[in-house]
Every structure is written in structure tokens, then in C-alpha cells.
Image (cartoon, coloured by chain):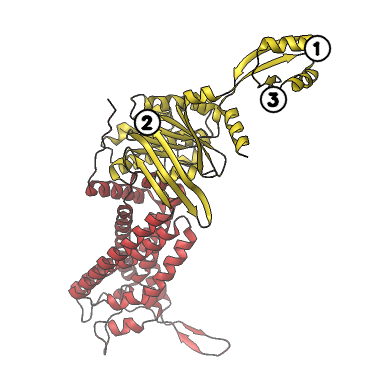
Chain colours: A yellow, B red
Amino acid sequence: MNAVEIRNLSKNFGAKQAVCGLEMTVPMGAIYGFIGENGSGKSTTEKMICGLIPTSGGTIKLYGKDYKDEAVRAKVGVLIEAPGCFPGLSVWENMMLQATNLGIEEAEKEVVRVLKRVRMEGAAGNKFKNCSLGMKQRVGIAMALLGDPTLLVLDEPLNGLDADGMRIMREVLRDIVKDGTRSVVVSSHLLGELQKVATHYGIIRHGKMIREMTAEELDTSCRTYVAMQNADMSRSKMLLGCKFSRVEEDEAGYLRVYDETTPEEIVTYLYENGICVTEIKTDKIGLEEYYIDLMKEGK
Amino acid sequence: MENQVKFESVSFGKRLGSMVRVDFRRMGKSKIFYILLACALVIPVLITVMMTMMDGSVSVNPQTGVETVMEGPENTWQSIGTLPTAGTENGQATAMGGMDVMGMCNINMMFMLTAVFICLFISEDFKSGYAKNLFAVRAKKSEYVISKTLSGFVCGALMLLAYFIGAMLGGAISGLSFELSTLNTGNIVMCILAKIFLMLVFISIFVLISVAAKQKTWLCLCGSLAAGMLLFMMVGMITPLGSTILNVLFCLACGMLFALGLGTISAVVLKKSSLV
């Protein structure tokens, strides 16, 4: 049984088709990184999973049941775009309202637990409108964690979080899925951060799922490259460009050769042309580069 | 062996109960609720005192030279409805055509004030994003509509009672008569009860307009006040000062019917439209 199973999902906004024929499978116990460009249909899909907008076609199943099933819905934790809190009420009051809404019996205990989890227990008395962006995001995460949800749907939860917040977020996500039954769907543009926690990926483009894979599959799909530095980078680039098909300079000032080669071959080749390599290493492209490559291929 | 996940079903009563508790807690913490309640209490005092002070004053139109004599209230109960006079039956006939100041500025204004409360209450749900949290964990939109109708009903009833108390205070301060003429206390109680039940009709309309307009507060307000104005004159006719149990039952039946019918439509609107 999968946590989320979406088949042939579509959503039209008038003449505009935001999602068309989307297929998506989130296994149980997965942290599913949902990636796509702005306007690709990520948030629309997440909103449909959460029942916030009606679908135009297709099916959504959560843990084998229809997504409208009351019992399943009650175990979904959500953070879509921004936390839904009343600005004039305190963090504590907002949390208590949601806890009451969820019918949690020991609401106060549960609120204390989740606020502690996101290290916000000290700010419980603050009015929500007076919280910083990062604090608001933490409150949103805490709210999504209320009632020990089986499925968490988080849309851009890392926005505005500081380094500590990001670390807490990673801990929380890993903690949630560790029993193997609960799952998380998380969309973010911070691909580096996402790669640190995601066990599965789904890449969406123009409302269609273009690739779904596990973290292991991503690892094997990511090409290796040789990166090097020397005193004459512009001449090296020219020389390597003559021999290899793809040579690029990265942000750190390294020359990267993406063709199938070895550091020895590059060192020898440049040495023969009078250039001495000062530093050379092999590495793999990350999720961000893989995603950019995939988008370029599509275009 | 594959991991199994069990989901417990929560009864309708429990779900509705928790939602109603949230709405009442919110209402208790809402500034606008207390402001409107204070207005409901103060408005009748001010109107009664001012109208009594202006009683008999003459204003002349400088262009036409026509003189208008201001007529203040003679009886405290005029803040609630029109007292029966010779040739009318239980004040109904006068109430039908009553376009005088006291005919407009009476307890029936509370139906409009309730519209303001419901519009702000519901649109805040959508504006703040609270609706996202709510509907993500609840598929049944009818529970939301019932909860809002109930909280609106309680608010409306409290406003009517506050206005009633304010009217009594205003009458006492202005030294107006509390004479009931041909009516009795039972009629007054029935009148207030009928108005409270009739409030359900208005609330159903306001809730429907508010869930359709969602975060567009101005649209909720304009729509609700316009709809309220259309039905405003009806209130005096259906709930005269000389109301009987029949008026109460009629208002109760109307209220239930409207709440059921328009409530269903409101739930369908929520189901078919985007909630964010």
C-alpha cells in the first residue's frame, strides 16, 4: 500500500490546464521531494491532495482510501504556502484552536510537545503577527505536526528558516518517517536542503510528472565529473574544450569536464600542452544540477 | 510483512462539537464581537434619549418653507416595534407601512449588525489561511456551515437581547412610559423569541454570501447588507410587538427551512470551489 497514489489527475482553471494526467506514487515511510519550476503545478497538486481545491479529473488515494475519507483526512498535517493562523491571537491560542479542531483530547500537552519539537515553547505567548518569518514558519510546522499525522504535506516549508530551523526541519522529517508507515510530501526550491532528507523524488513540469525516482536512483543517474584548477584557466578551458564535448566553469572557479574521463588523462593532456594542474578531483552532480539538466533536456 | 496503518473514524457529533467549540472560543476572543455587542447595547439608549430630547422641535426647509415637527417616542416599547393604535391590530398594520424614524431605527437593525459580524468572522477564516488548516483535516463542508450558522445565531440572539436591554435602559433614562396598552408581557417575550428565530433566516443568507465571497470581505459585506435590506421590512411584519406563539412557530419554521436549504447550498458552494 502506498501513502499517496495519484492517477491521471487533472486540474483546469478556466481554459488553463494547471495539472494534466499527473501520476504520482508516494510509498509509505518516504520523504517525497516534489520538485518543479514556478507554476509547474506543485502547489495545485498538493492542494488537491489536501482537498483544498476540487479536481477536474483523476483519482487521489491516501493509504488506499479515497482522499475525501474523513478518517484519513483527520490524520493529514498540512503547511501550504503560509501557516493559517489568526494574526491577533497568540501562538498558543492558535495552536489550541487547531488542537481543538482536531479533537485532540489532551490538547495542552500536545501543543506543548509540538512547540518543543520546533523549539518555539518560549514564544508561545507571542502574538502571531509579531513573530518573525522564520518563527511563523516554525509555528506552521508545529501546527502540521499536531495530532501525530500519518501524512504530512508541506509546501515550501523551508522558506524563511534559519540554519537551526533547517536542521530542526530535517530532524522532524526523519523522525516522522522512521516507523515506516508515515510519509511526507515536501516541495521546495532549496534543492540542496531537500537532497539531505528526501528518500524519493518527483519532478513535475507543465503539470505532468516527468520523472519519479528514489534517492538511490538519483545517485546512480547523477553523472560524475572531473573538476580541476590551475594557473591558466582560460587556456585550459580552450584546450579541454577542443578534446571534450562538455567543459564548464563552476561558481567556485573550477573547470568541470563532464565527459567520461579520468583525472590522470586530463593531467597528462594539459601537461603535454604546458599547463600544470594544481588541484583535481572527481565528484558527482547534485540534485540541483540534475534537475537543471533535466529541465534543459525538456526545453 | 507490509506495515498497516489504521484510521479511526470520528463521529459526526464529535467532529461538529469540536468545530463549534473552536468557533465559540474564537468568538469569545474576537474584538469585533464585543464592539458589535456594545453597539447593540448603546445604540438604543442613544436613539431613545436623543429622540426624546428632540421631541417637538420644528425644522423649516428654507427653500419650500415647509415645517417639520420631530416626533419623539412616547413609549419605551417603540424601540422594539410599533405599538397598536386605534384601527390597527397588534401593531401589524402600522409596522407594514412604518417608515418613520422609530420604525427604521429599532431592534430590527440588529439583523444588519449580525451581517457585519458573520462577514468578518467567515472572511477572516479564509484571509488568515485558517480555512486551509481546517478543510485539510475535514472533508465535510456541511459541518463548517452548521458551525458558522450556530455561532452566528448565538451572536444574533445576544445582540437582540443587548438591544432589548439597551432599549429598556434608554426608556428609563428618558422617562418614557412602559405602558403596554392592549398587549401583555407574553407578547413582548414572543416578539423577541420570534425575532431570534427569524435571525436564522438572515444568518443562512449571510453565511451563503460569505462562503461564496470567501476572503473578499467587501463583497461579503455589500452582498449581505444588500440582501438584508431587501428583507428588512419583512421583519416588522412577521414579528410585531403583539406577537403570539404562532409568530414564534412561523419564524422557527422559516428559520429551520432556510438554514437547511441555504446551508446545503453553502456546503455545495464550498465543495465545488477553491478554498484557498
Q: CA distance from mark 3 to mark 1?
A: 19 Å
Is any part of residue B200 visible from this angle?
yes
Disc 2 vs disc 1: which is toward the camera? Answer: 1
Give the label on residue A246, or none. 3
**Quarter of the rendering containing residue B148:** bottom left
Image position of B65 with respect to A202: above or below: below
Question: What residue did someone put label 2 on?
Answer: A114
Q: Position of residue A75 (x, y in %)?
A: 32, 38
In this rendered view, identify the residue nearer to me: A137 or B183. Answer: A137
**Which is more N-terminal, label 1 or label 3?**
3
What amino acid is labelled 2 in the image?
Val
What amino acid is labelled 1 in the image?
Asn
Are the numbered discs 2 and 3 placed on the same chain, yes or no?
A: yes
Q: Position of residue A295 (x, y in %)?
A: 60, 36
**Which is more N-terminal, label 3 or label 2?**
2
Is any part of residue A132 visible from this angle?
no
Question: What residue did someone put label 1 on?
Answer: A273
